Image (spheres, grey):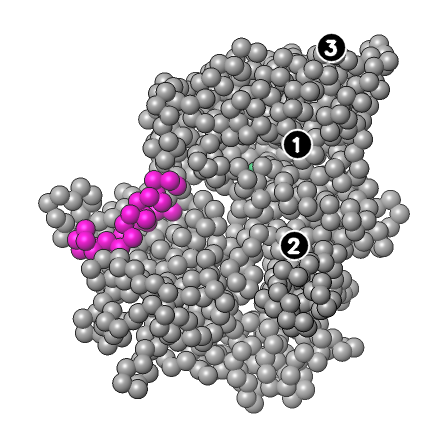
Amino acid sequence: MSNPVEIWKASKHGFDVWADVQRYAAAGTAMKDIDQADLERMKWYGFFYRKRDAPGRYMNRIRVTAGELTAAQAKAVAHLAYEFGHGVIDVTTRANLQVQGLDIRHLPKVSERLQRVGLTSKQTGHDNIRNVFGHPFSGLMPGELIDTRQLCHDITAIFLDSREYSDLPRKMNICLNGTPHHSAHFWTQDISFLATRTPQGEAAFHLLIAGTQGQTPHLARRLPVFVRLEQTVEVTRALLDLFRAKGLREKRNAARFCFLVDDIGPEGVLAWLDERLPFRLERSTEQPSPASAYDELIGWFHQREGQLWTMGLNAPLGRLSWRQLEGLAILSAKWGDGRLRTTHEQGIAVVNIPAQFKNAAAIDAAALGLSVHADSFDRNSMACTGSQFCNIAVTETKGHMFQLLEKLRKKKVQLEGIRIHMSGCPSSCAQHFTADIGLKGVRVRRLVGTREGFDVFLGGGIGGQIEMGRPYRLGVDVDQLPNVIEEVVADYYLHHRPGETFSAYWRERLPADEGVKTADGDYRPPIWVCENCQHRHVGIDPPVFCPGCAGLRRFFARLDEESGASPSGPASKAQTHARSDGFVYATEDDALKADAGLEVEVNGKPIALFRVNGQVYAVDAACPHEGAPLAQGTVENGVVTCPWHGWTFNACTGCSLEPANQNLARYEALAEDGKIFIKVETTPKTPAGKPPAVLDKPRHAAPAVAALPLIEVIEETPDVRTFRFDNSAGRITLDYPGKFVSLCVEIEGQENWRNFTVSSSPERGGQLDLTIKLNPEGTVSRHLFAHARRGAEFTLRGPQGGFYFDPERHWEPLLLVSAGSGITPMMSILRSLKDRGLELPCAFAYGARTAADIVFHQECSRLAAASPWLSYHASLSQPEVNWRGACGRLSVDRLQALAGDLAPRQCFLCGPNDFMDSLREGLLLAGVAAERIHAEQFQAAKPARA
Ligand code: SF4
């Protein structure tokens, strides 16, 4: 059992943390002093540590089974938020309530207060079964086949407070829908019961299993059976038993129920049910009716009994203030019977309102700032918690979504039912894969450093049949979202066929599985206007002084409605569509000069174009040696020379000339009507969750030569120092962690170039750190240690090198191994993982001679203590007597003991050559594929090109 989560789960059950929680609460223990595993175990009680919510606050997720909430319960939650939290409550996409901002001292009290009103937050996180919900208006709607509320409670009773069912391999989602129409949400659950009628006319359920959103989105699969109402609880229990008994626990990223079903197939699940259940499920060949539409949950809904109405309210993006929730509790008791419903679309409803009180209830709701009317923006948008509170978020969400909707309103974009969902990371809590327009938070590289951005998916949800969205544009800067959405909506209205939905329209036009990566050129910076002289400036920020009137920066106002045009930006998106003959627009013909290269990106693939004897030729953009951009190489007589290491290729055919057998792929190119088109074969589809068999070379930043001032010298160990350079102007773009730069030191009028790996993270591009070990015989390091002072300027060239970590290619668990000063690229990788919020399982083993020689020991220890995904292991070859850690040279056996099976890992090695040679050999013997072993190799320093 190598999975560290299973190890700490086995050492102490989540339920057993409560005594510790009470102890921490009594002592007011700071979050940083609480054992990480205990912080995780608190999720068994519904308390989630929030490291971003300083200084160490907790979120409480409250289970609202079947969405049923009483006025007393709503009031109690509102008061908890007011007394102990930030005063805000979020309704989630599982109809839970979340209270943010709790202090450790208040957790026992919160739990007790919930219990008093019949609520619980138990088992709402980690490897537990999450809130069981049905249609929010179940039991009230005319035409409903099955009232699912009691079944939701009965299923919850199976696992609540049960030790057996609170230790699953991963979380599990269950829902029941008693209506004949099933919206998208009900198709992405681990277990989903969808009401239908058997051929005999009896109400029963279809059984769908193994749906999921998140990292490996899957629609649920139907089991060919009918489940009768009285069988539902036992069928659920048997499925939970199956997951407990056979779910994969070795790897977290393959532990969800869907992987088990992939493994044994629906037939295997059916065989298990047949064996375990005391009754045989009736077989059915009937398919569930396709998902019809999103549930309409805002407005007035006539209930099936008496003259009673449900008032569905718009809670924008699911956020309520404590006053609003308290007000709703009062309102529900005053005009209804004190009952409310939370909805899986982040909304809330008051039920059982007599017809004569409808107006009065709506007026009271309006006084609380809540409306039964919502425009198409509020009605069709959803956003998860995001980086305001969520530990693993990559971006903020609710704030961005509010701004996005405002900008779309100003632009008068007509959504008319087109849904936009925004998730702050791949976990997809806002279900971006099943929205018409799905937005997934990512960091995007932009000129200097990185900014928040989103991958845009189109075509999810309903479009004749339910499907997952397809990538449209990747890495769109958050500022550009309104433009991109305006364009895709306008494109749909202009060109769609009668009756064709937005999703169906885009699905047809996005056949490929890969979206177009947004490049720097696609970014349309905002326009600023000087209020003195009306001078217009296009840029991320206004200029320091106005070039028109020398006015100060503060006189510039941003024009929200406009942005600088970009020739290759989303506006020209239509040009990127494939022609019927398969050729795709690449660039304007006059952009490609004779005997010079031009790099373009087509369907996300970087391609180098060359014009030789008037003809256009297209080959791979990256040199197969270290990924250098060939378009920047010299072209003479049809031969292109790699700008980094001088490899040569035939620019027309892609054949390698020197060295041989390193051919580039060649693509058909066509010049027509002043435009260049290329035919690119799309990457074949691969099974979900598995990488493509062949990975393309990623695009690399061109090495730049820049003089950077030294801003700090940090003493790491007696003979290792970090030299920190000011790169705030972004003159050197570190694209991937692990790369090196060349540094020039002038000694006695002589230029001396040396290569040093960067130890800082690309995400903090404003500084460039070189961590250098003093070589007593080395000219350059001795000179730096003796003479380099703050303020001095040095010439650097980079980034360079073929040793780097790319999260899009290296998605498997990592093994980092380094010795001595070989830690520098590993530090850059670790810092980058942390800065990007990438919780990729990573084992880092570091060998040094003595404790004094360990570089970055404190930072690595702290990071490992705060990061469940990272294990850090320092081993000394000449330990002092008081050293308590591991001793001896790092060997493959030791690495196996530390990280378990090494075969599935991407291994990065950096250290002395003999150390790396023996490790590489051992890793190959341990079953690691050669292409997964990356070893740092410096090339001899070269003078920079002018
Ligand atoms: Fe957090 Fe990601 Fe879920 Fe959003 S989608 S709430 S960012 S885990």
* Ligand number 1: quarter of image: top right
Q: Earlier along the polypeptide chain: callout 3 or callout 2? A: 3
**For residue 652, above or below residue 218:** below
Name the residue tied to disc 3: 337
Q: Amino acid at mark 3?
A: Asp
Pick the residue in front: 20 or 894: 20
Q: Earlier in the sequence, mark 2 or mark 1?
A: 1
State the CA–CA distance, disc 1 to disc 3.
23 Å
**Image point (46%, 61%), residue name:** 766
Taking the magenta stretch, the answer to whether it contains residue 927 is no
> Residue flagged by tag 2: what amino acid is it?
Asp
Q: Which quarter of the picture shows residue 913?
A: bottom left
Q: Secondary structure at mark 3?
A: loop
Along the horizontal axis of the image, is 861 left or right of 888? right
Give me the residue at 61% from left, 37% from top. 384
Dividing the picture into quadrants, the one containing residue 382 is top right
Residue occupied by mark 1:
318
